[in-house]
């Protein structure tokens, strides 16, 4: 399959200048419908729950309680057909244009915002979730599977924030049972740029870009598929840093992941 998207030099420059970029189309309408079917099936069947791959990003993730921000890590593990597709071919083309020929895929996930009560994704920098020992040059491509609007929680960015350091974060609501992180000090909201995006379009943000997505106040689910790309990380050699907020976490997701790994290693 050949890519159907190619960035202009202006778009490439915009990304490096601002740390984000919005594209009107990364895949076809037919493929969006196909992706939506897979997506709904994975959430409805609670795929990955036992392994800790499906959990509530915004809550304590207790059994029997509706998740406010359900997330699935590595959905392709539960739907191998996601390995194919125009969105992937185009995403790789965009990644090569933004970061060069050595770019590699770096993780993917799906975030579902249920209608009317889907929680906001608070202001954060993605690198705050990762190890402080490594230096990253990567981006996440966020693909909504329906139109993303201010009402249902489209992405918002602080232009230029990718040039700063990682600021202190904490678990959402200062609850260490919650996987999701938020910045201790939210940025000046007047500097935020909201990016309403058509279904099958995308936004792209760098690993340090401050970003936020509002709650879903609409009557329809807000589905987003997120795929990451980057240059292979190198050891971090900047000023000392400590992402202590990750060491404080005690999430049910991690417990399930650990239990699943233990079972795999010791099948008895
Ligand atoms: Ni993020």
Image (cartoon, grey):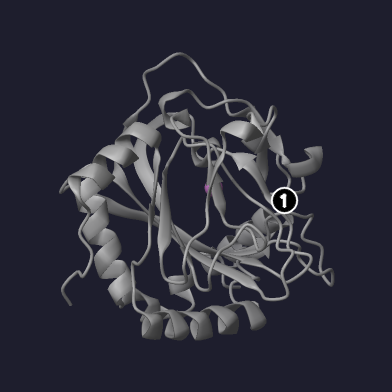
Q: Is mark 1 on a helix, strand or loop?
A: loop
Q: Position of residue 261 (x, y in %)?
A: 56, 62
Q: Could you tell whether 37 is left or right of 86 in the image?
A: right
Q: Could you tell whether 207 is left or right of 45 in the image?
A: left
Q: In the rendered image, which quarter contains the N terminus? A: bottom left
Q: How crowded is mark 1: few (under 14 residues within 10 Å), some or many (20 or more)?
A: many
**Can residue 123 be seen here?**
yes
Q: Where is residue 40 in the image (x, y as percent from the top left)?
A: 59, 81
Closer-to-camera residue (256/149): 149
Residue placed at 26% from the left, 38% from the top?
13
**Can residue 233 be seen here?**
no
Note whether 34 is above or below 167 in the view shown: below
Disc 1 marks which residue? 251
Residue 111: image quadrant is bottom right
Residue placed at 72% from the left, 51% from the top?
251
Residue placed at 76% from the left, 62% from the top?
68
Residue placed at 74% from the left, 49% from the top?
178
Residue 31: image quadrant is bottom left
Q: Could you tell whether 106 is left or right of 187 in the image?
A: left
Closer-to-camera residue (54/123): 123
Q: Position of residue 101 (x, y in %)?
A: 15, 49
């Amino acid at each position: 399959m050949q890519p159907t998207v190619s960035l202009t030099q202006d778009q490439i420059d915009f990304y490096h200048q601002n740390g984000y970029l919005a594209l009107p189309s990364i895949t076809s309408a037919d493929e969006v419908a196909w992706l939506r079917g897979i997506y709904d099936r994975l959430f409805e069947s609670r795929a990955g729950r036992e392994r800790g791959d499906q959990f509530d990003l915004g809550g304590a993730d207790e059994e029997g309680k509706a998740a406010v921000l359900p997330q699935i890590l590595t959905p392709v593990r539960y739907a191998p057909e996601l390995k194919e597709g125009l969105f992937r071919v185009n995403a790789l083309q965009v990644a090569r244009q933004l970061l060069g020929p050595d770019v590699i895929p770096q993780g993917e996930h799906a975030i579902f915002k249920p209608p009317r009560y889907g929680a906001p994704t608070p202001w954060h920098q993605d690198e705050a979730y990762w190890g402080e020992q490594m230096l990253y040059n990567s981006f996440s491509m966020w693909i909504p599977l329906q139109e993303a609007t201010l009402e249902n929680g489209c992405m918002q960015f602080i232009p230029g924030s990718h040039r700063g350091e990682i600021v202190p974060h904490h678990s959402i609501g200062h609850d260490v049972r919650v996987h999701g992180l938020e910045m201790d000090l939210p940025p000046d909201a007047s500097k935020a740029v909201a990016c309403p995006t058509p279904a099958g379009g995308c936004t792209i943000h760098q690993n340090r870009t401050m970003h936020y997505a509002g709650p879903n106040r609409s009557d329809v689910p807000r589905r987003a598929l997120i795929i990451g790309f980057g240059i292979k990380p190198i050891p971090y050699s900047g000023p000392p840093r400590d992402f202590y907020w990750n060491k404080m976490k005690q999430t049910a997701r991690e417990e399930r992941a650990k239990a699943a790994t233990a079972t795999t290693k010791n099948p008895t």
